[in-house]
């Protein structure tokens, strides 16, 4: 058939579209954004509080949080309300997941950092007030509310600055993204600051401690995960898991992280 392009254009005009992208969005209904299901978020937040209570319950007594109600208000409800009031939730998207689920995943990691922060301070034998949050998340601005390779915490011990990257695994898959390792190497090269990844395997009840800046580029634990769009990750070997959550906190000397 001659003049196909002209026909296609005429056809779309008859449908009411002078622009191809407008026609594509209309036909795929991409211009229709689902409303945020706040009732669903309330249920997710309740589940997160339940996860915290169950996790806190199994810790040995000197590691427990003694006021989870206040803690939940401060680190779950308050961040959620800030994000909601600044219209951030509707803009959250990750690999096609609903914003409510992206919010839940972010809050879950965020609150785990805060729950374990006093425990990490005890591990490093420093006051918790000396642990500084250095991540790039800004709860009021979608442009800065994003994942970056910057570590979560920074501490000073024996006049040495140390970055701490905190991760939490909930499905039994324990990986560190390669870009986290590259960033740690760069920080050490530029500023002589060491980076330790503390990976909390919530699914299996164990915690790994990995010195990121000392991982070799050709380490055999680097693998490609197809379920993560082919990203290269450092698969955490079982030997890195030095603390079982049902046990007392180990000493820093026994972690073998080269500090």
Image: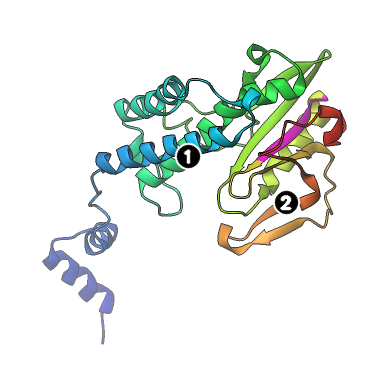
- Above or below, 109 against 1 in this view is above
Q: Is residue 156 magenta?
A: no
| Residue ID for mark 1 | 51
* Horizontal side, residue 234 vs residue 219: left or right: left
The answer to whether any part of residue 257 appears in the image is no
Q: Residue at x 37, y 29 (%)?
A: 80
Q: Secondary structure at mark 1?
A: helix
- The residue segment tinted magenta is 192-199
Q: Nearer the viewer, residue 133 or 59?
A: 59
The answer to whether any part of residue 163 appears in the image is yes
* Horizontal side, residue 204 vs residue 4: left or right: right
Q: Nearer the viewer, residue 97 or 51?
A: 51
- Graded by Cα atoms within 10 Å as few (under 14), some (14 to 19) or many (20 or more), the crowding at tag 2 reads many
Coordinates of residue 9 in the picture (x, y in percent): 22, 69
Coordinates of residue 170 in the picture (x, y in percent): 55, 48
Which tag, 2 or 1, sits closer to the chain's start? 1
Going by the picture, which residue comes out furthest to the bottom? 1
Q: Main secondary structure of the magenta part?
A: strand
* 2 and 1 marks in contact (CB < 8 Å): no
As measured in the structure, the alpha-carbon distance from the residue carrying label 2 to the one carrying label 1 is: 27 Å
Q: Residue at x 55, y 23 (%)?
A: 65
Coordinates of residue 151 in the picture (x, y in percent): 65, 31
Mark 2 vs mark 1: in front: 1
| Residue ID for mark 2 | 234
Quadrant in which the N terminus is drawn? bottom left
Q: Nearer the viewer, residue 80 or 91?
A: 80
> Which numbered circle lies on residue 39?
none
Q: Secondary structure at mark 2?
A: strand
């Amino acid at each position: 058939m001659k003049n196909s392009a002209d026909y296609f254009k005429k056809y779309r005009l008859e449908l009411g579209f002078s622009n191809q992208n407008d026609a594509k969005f209309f036909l795929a209904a991409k211009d229709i954004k689902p409303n945020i299901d706040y009732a669903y978020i309330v249920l997710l937040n309740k589940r997160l509080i339940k996860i915290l209570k169950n996790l806190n319950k199994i810790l040995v007594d000197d590691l427990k949080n003694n006021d989870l109600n206040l803690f939940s208000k401060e680190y779950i409800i308050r961040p959620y309300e800030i994000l909601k009031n600044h219209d951030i939730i509707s803009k959250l998207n990750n690999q096609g997941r609903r914003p409510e689920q992206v919010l839940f995943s972010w809050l879950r990691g965020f609150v785990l950092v805060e729950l374990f922060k006093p425990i990490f301070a005890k591990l490093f034998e420093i006051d918790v007030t000396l642990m500084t949050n250095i991540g790039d998340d800004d709860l009021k601005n979608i442009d800065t509310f994003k994942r970056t390779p910057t570590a979560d915490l920074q501490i000073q011990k024996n006049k040495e600055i140390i970055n701490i990257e905190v991760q939490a695994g909930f499905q039994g898959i324990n990986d560190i993204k390669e870009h986290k390792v590259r960033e740690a190497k760069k920080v050490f090269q530029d500023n002589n600051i060491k980076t330790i990844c503390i990976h909390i395997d919530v699914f299996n009840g164990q915690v790994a401690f990995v010195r990121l800046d000392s991982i070799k580029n050709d380490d055999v634990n680097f693998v490609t995960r197809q379920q993560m769009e082919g990203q290269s990750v450092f698969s955490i070997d079982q030997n890195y898991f030095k603390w079982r959550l049902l046990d007392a906190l180990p000493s820093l000397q026994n972690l073998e992280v080269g500090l």
